[in-house]
Amino acid sequence: MADYKIHLLVCGGTGCKSSNSQVLIEHLRTEIRNQGLEDFAQVTGTACFGFCEKGPIVKIIPGDTFYTQVKPADAKEIVEEHIVKGQKVARLLYKDPKSDKIITDPKGMEFYKKQIRIALRNCGVIDPENIHESLARNGYAALGKVLTTMTPDETIEIIKKSGLRGRGGAGFPAGLKWEITRKSPGNEKYVVCNADEGDPGAFMDRSILEGDPHSVIEAMAINGYCTGASKGLVYIRAEYPLAIERLKTAINQAREYGLLGENIFGTGFSFDITLRYGAGAFVCGEETALIHSMEGNRGEPTMKPPFPSVKGYLGKPTNVNNVETFASIPVIILKGPDWYSSIGTEKSKGTKVFALAGKVNNVGLIEVPMGITLREVIFEIGGGIKNGKKFKGVQIGGPSGGCLTYKHLDTPIDYDSLIAAGAMMGSGGMIIMDEDDCMVDVAKYFLDFTVDESCGKCTPCRVGNKRMHELLVSITKGNGTHEDIDRLINLGNVIRDTSLCMLGQSAPNPVLSIMDNFREEYEAHIRDKKCPSGVCKALMIYEIVEENCVGCTACARACPVGAITGERKEIHRIDPSLCIKCGACMDRCKFNAVIVN
Amino acid sequence: MEMVKITIDNKSVEVPRGTSILKAAKQVGIEVPTLCYMDLHDLNIEHKPGGCRVCVVEVEGRRNLAPSCCTDVNDGMVVKTHSIRVLNARRTVMELILSDHPKECLTCPKSGNCDLQNMAIKMGIREIHNQDIAEMSTYRTDFSPAIIRDMNKCIMCRRCETMCNDFQTVGALSAINRGFMSVVAPAFEMDLEDSVCTYCGQCVAVCPTGALTEVDHTRRLIRDLANPAKTVIVQTAPAVRAALGEMFDLPAGSLVTGKMVSALRTLGFKYVFDTDFSADLTIMEEGTEMLDRLSRHLAGDKSVRLPILTSCCPGWVNFFESQFIDMLEIPSTARSPQQMFGSIAKTYFADKIKVKREDLIVVSIMPCLAKKYECTRDEFKVNGNPDVDYSVSTRELAHLIKEANIDFHSLPDEDFDRPLGESSGAGVIFGATGGVIEAAVRTAYELFTKKRLERLDFKELRGMEGIREATIDFDGLPVKIGIAHGLGNARKLLEDIRSGKCSYHAIEIMACPGGCIGGGGQPLHHGNFEILNKRMAAIYREDVGKPIRKSHENPYIIKLYEEFLGKPMSEKSHKLLHTHYVDKSKKIIYI
């Protein structure tokens, strides 16, 4: 990295970017120029550090000083104090919320302590737009090793031995997939990288592509060598402009350096990559739908078999893996399968990236070893529940995953344990819910997503999920009956049993797992017509506590529909038949006289 | 062939690898219910999108149920087709489909002939749970001159898409929107009329519900028949008589020409004529045009473009007008038999019976939906008055006969009226693929060679093969003939011609499988092509039974030329019996 003595790494991930990190970078550069230090200190925009909760992040090397929530206005102080005088800016350092101690090095932070960053190894470390930084961190060394010293079969054997399973959700053994594609007859084959990440709130693949595109390119080329493909395609959603831009830059740089294109490393192996843009359909993450979309057809799945490895893009054998799977490949080849398989559990090896979201203190992007428990993730890495509230549930596996509860907190995170618990690994969305969340409403929310994202091809998914959603709406409006529960369970089971693709088959999961784990909440809505968490508006009743009411008339004046009556200095009343549950009265009352039941 | 052994409902069966569970079950007499599935075996189309999920079965060791139509058997597979799990799933799925389907069966045009209704009956569905809170997916109804799209009744079986895109290669229909609102429609949900739709009606013929139906002219017809100020006459296309009987439970292939004429007369038509007559007239014009082009070509005239293409089929005409505009000048300019009939009826015949054009209503009974559109074309109107007022399909005619309390079976056999009811066997075979060109050969041969044709049955031109070719010896001149039925086959043939891969002198093209006998207005054959073969046999039977089998020998055709037209391709013929084609390529949307 040139002759710079000090490196300032500023997060340029989407989260930090929207908190002005781009301006921060400019300010830092200006300040450094003002001090005449442009040959001494360099500012680099990197990709996501993961700790989005505390962004924008600035990390200064050497010393690994980790500044959090840095604003453009802080640039001057950082340069003057840290760079010029060598003194850390205390107010920008991370303070551990439990011990209140200042921690300067991320290795000491709860958030990072238990993480092992393999797929994310370069994210937040290198400038993704500069291939030299990738090369300096062993970029393309695995490709070189494979092309010059290994046969395709030997390479596949390494992947198989590593135990790496597909990170797209289903967890199919990656090496086996490569082997099937290799063995499928055909003179033309394709490598496809599935970058159609669609879970709400998930940004694992985007961060990898934004932070370390070269690893994915390198792995695709390795896959091409193993399977006999010379063409690679990245199916990426058009809503990821930064990832697309960085990927394009990286592909061009790789071509320029002869790492893509004809006769790579003089070995006679040729491989190149083109991009295909998705229009933002969740179902196009399903590999057959993705392939149809790339072919210019309607993005909807078809029956498997035939599997893409046998008959995929344009009818040719096609190896589809997702971004995270590919990103793990080069390092497995360089460090060996034994190293990789030493991480994780017996059947789930290595690490998994999760997007931690919801009511947890440290939201962000994390990479953890398989086998870590939900408790460790939520309460250690995640720093526990926000505002000291009580943990209620965790939705794991995206919108079609399952919702687990406190009794599952010690479940190890691996493919099989999660399925056994009624959830699934999915692609890595993890949303934490607290006591304020109504689980029926949560089920409705996730189902609403899948109803919207269904392609409409098969009946159970097209109509069935819609009908389940309608039942949930009815229950949250207080119109549910006890038969509705049986109906939901039957519909859910039939949809699971008969839908064409995994989107449909897993769509009822949130509803059914919440039924298993939070049945009392469904029953409260149906039997008592009450929403215990006070979320479902239709079930709320605003009332005035007589003892507290002083008759100030503030609430009556605030009510937009005239539902509150009462003379001055007399107790007021709310007419529930007129009340629209807007909460204006409650906001206005200074005497805590308005309550919700 | 590798065989695999499986067990279905405790019955063992051995089938070739690659067989679906559905087909394997059939071999041991188990009919797994299906809805979206469609097997058009003779057309090499097996539509199995696996969409409806009605045909699911339980496969031992499999996590979820398997759609039997698109799951292939594996060695040792154990299948249950009616376990409780299967029956519950199937019933729930069926209920879901019905929950998003209008309950208008009593007034639906498909009532009684609806796959969905039949399945509901079969499963004994008596209740649809939570219908009171179930939203319906609703769409605006799309009226075109020939086909009505009432997509509220669409169940997303996608059969129409397969016919339109894979078989016909027209590309007018595809699924749009997603999730609950997904539906089959023209691009951007435009009107069918503005799309590349050819009105071939094959989508209507395979639609399991009332989502795609024909424009119904029977109310209008009843009003006209009851109007004393109007003289209502009718023409019937050749393919109608070979299929109408099926609507009255007669076996496929029953010829009901006499009963049909009798029924039409009973309904109140003043004159019952035959489109076969104008088919003979078409041969006179088209055959002459063909010989003219051929002779000029043989004489070395480089401006002549061959092959000459038939132009009787309005679906086909719509197809090349939108998709093959660089070939607009090669189809014959001869109008279709329906339009030639209308033109002659409203001139020659109207004069004869001294009825004013406006007071003469010409109705056609057609096996076709595109004919409904054809008679609305501006080229076929005089001062806004159409030569053919409207066209009624075979199915509509059957409904009308039933409505009028006519006992079809006890009707006597009657003959067509004269002069426009007399026809040769050549006119009859227009109804089957290859028939038009065979009819043309019978006449062109004699006109060209000036010799008598001994052999009248050109078996080499007949059959159900999608693309056929034959060379007919015109007394030393080998005339190369191509035949295609189904627009997908037509496309192949035309693209080969365009690229110079093959050359013909004359080509017959029909939009529908089997020709008009498989038309979009015929009794629904539900993809059973045995029915089409029987209809085809009936057509050729009628031909053999005719005393005159060559168009130019039809005495009333001879008389028409003597009294009125002069000779084929005369100025009057040109005005009344020929047309021009329009560039409709703008209807194609390029993305």
Image (tube, coloured by chain):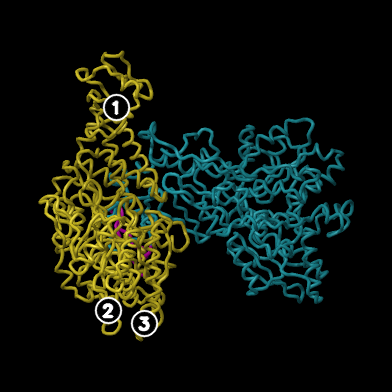
Alpha-carbon span between mark 2 and mark 3: 13 Å
Where is mark 2, residue-wise? Answer: A141
Q: Nearer the viewer, mark 2 or mark 3?
A: 2
Please report the residue visible at 63 percent of the width from the left and 32 percent of the height from the top: B405
Determine the secondary structure under disc 1.
Answer: helix
Q: Nearer the viewer, mark 1 or mark 2?
A: 1
Q: Chain of mark 1?
A: A
Residue behind mark 1: A588
Nearest the viewer among B581 and B586 is B586
Q: Colour of chain B?
A: cyan
10 Å neighbourhood of mark 3: few (<14), some, or many (≥20)?
some
State left or right for residue B36 relative to residue A326. Answer: right
Q: Percent x, y for residue B143? A: 60, 42
Identify the magenta region. B1-18
Badge 1 amino acid: Arg
Q: In the rendering, what colour is chain A?
A: yellow
